[in-house]
Image (tube, rainbow, N blue to C red):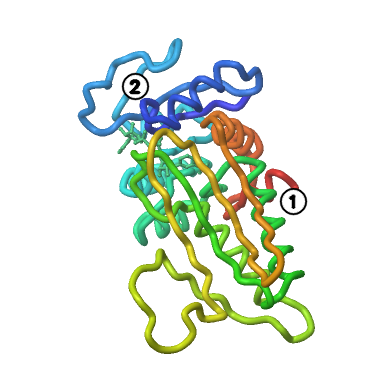
Amino acid sequence: MTRVCVIGPQGRMGRAVLALARERQNLQVVSAVVRPGSPAVGAEVTPGVVATDDVDAALAQADVYIDFTTPQATADVALAAMARSVPAVVGTTGLNDRAHAALEALSKRAPVLWAPNFSPGVNVLLDLAERAARALGPELDIEVVEIHHRQKRDAPSGTALALAEALTRGRADAGAGQGTALAPVFGRAGIKDTGAPRAPGELGIAAVRGGDVVGEHTAYFLGDHERIELTHRAATRSVFAAGALRAATWLAGRPAGRYRMRDVLGL
Ligand code: NAD
C-alpha cells in the first residue's frame, strides 16, 4: 500500500487525483496540502483526510507526494521534501528556473518524476512523433498546434514544448546526413519581406485557448503532396490522474534520481 500526499487537493487536477485514488486498492491518500493560510485548512478533501498548510507534517506521513499546482508551490514543496527525502510525482507546467532547481536538488536525495503530461497516450505520441521526424527527414515541414481550456495559465503547453523537443531530436537524427536543426517559432504574425516566408528549420508552435478543452496536441508533417497529422485528444483529466497514480506507485521505493513517464510505461 503506497501512502500518498496530494498537494493542491482543490485544484482541477488535485480533485481528479483524489477521485481516482478513492477507487484504487494499492494506494491511499493520507494527507493533503493547501496554500498557506487557505480557508480550506481543516476541511475534509476526501474521506478521512483533512487539508493542512503544514507541508512538513503532511509529507511526514507519505511514501510519495503528487503535485499539480503552480511553479512557486512546486519549488516550495520540493525544497520542503528534501528534509525527509520524499519521492515526488510532479505535473505542474510552466516551471521557472527556481522550480527546476528545486526538483533537481530533491532528486539528489529522492526519486523525482516530473512530466508535462501523464497520459500514457501522449507519451506514446511523443515517441511516434520523434520516430516520424527521423524517418521523414527535412522534406516535410513540421508544426505543432495545441488547444486548452480558457483557464490555462501557461502557453504553449508543457506538452507542446515536449512534443517540439521530441520532433527536434528526431529531425536532428534524420538519416543520410540530412539531419538539420529545428528552431521553435512561437505563433506567427506580420509580413516577411525578406528571405523565405517560412525558413526550412522553423518549427511553428501555436496555442489555442478557450472553453473547457482538457487538452489536444497535434504534430503536423506537411509535404508538397501529402500531410501526416499525429493527434492526441484528452477528454477528461482522469487520464492524467491515472498516469500520476501509476507513476506514484512505481516511483515509491526507487533510488534517488530523475525519472520520466516513459520509464514508468517501459517505452
Ligand atoms: P488549478 O488552478 O485548478 O489548481 C492549482 C491548485 O494549486 C489550486 O487549487 C491552488 O490553490 C493550489 N496551490 C497553489 N499554491 C499552492 C501551495 N503553495 N500549496 C498547495 N496548493 C497550492 O490548476 P490545474 O488545472 O489543476 O493545473 C495545475 C497544474 O498542472 C498546471 O501547471 C497545469 O498545466 C498542470 N497540468 C499538468 C498535467 C500533466 O499531465 N502533467 C495535466 C493537467 C494539468
Q: Which residue is mark 1?
A: 267
Q: Earlier in the sequence, mark 2 or mark 1?
A: 2
Question: x and y percent of residue 52 in the render?
Answer: 32, 24
Query: Which residue in the protein does label 2 denote?
Result: 51
Which quadrant of the structure image shows residue 132?
A: bottom right
Residue placed at 39% from the left, 45% from the top?
209
Alpha carbon of mark 2 to alpha carbon of mark 1: how far?
A: 36 Å
Judged by depth in the image, the label closer to the viewer, 2 or 1, is 1
Query: Within 8 Å: ligand 1 and the Cβ of disc 2?
Result: no
Q: What residue occupies the far right of the structure in this picture?
A: 176
Q: Is residue 194 left or right of residue 143?
A: left
Q: In the displayed structure, would residue 263 be above or below residue 62?
A: below
Cβ–Cβ under 8 Å for marks 2 and 1: no
Ligand 1 quarter of the rendering: top left
- The amino acid on which the numbered mark 1 sits, given as a three-letter code, is Leu
Image-quadrant location for residue 235: top right
Query: Quick check: can you spot residue 30?
Result: yes
Total number of numbered discs in the rendering: 2
- Give x and y (percent) for residue 239: 59, 33
Residue 12 appears in which quarter of the rendering? top left
- Look at the numbered disc 2 and give the secondary structure of its residue: strand
**Is residue 114 at least partly visible in the picture?**
no
| In the foreground, 106 or 215 | 215
Report the residue at 55% width, 26% height from top.
3
Residue neighbourhood size for the residue with mark 1, other residues' Cα within 10 Å, grouped as few (<14), some (14–19), many (≥20): few
On screen, residue 202 above or below 146 = below
The residue under label 2 is which amino acid type? Answer: Ala
Q: Is residue 254 above or below residue 10?
A: below
Q: Residue at x 51, y 20 (%)?
A: 19
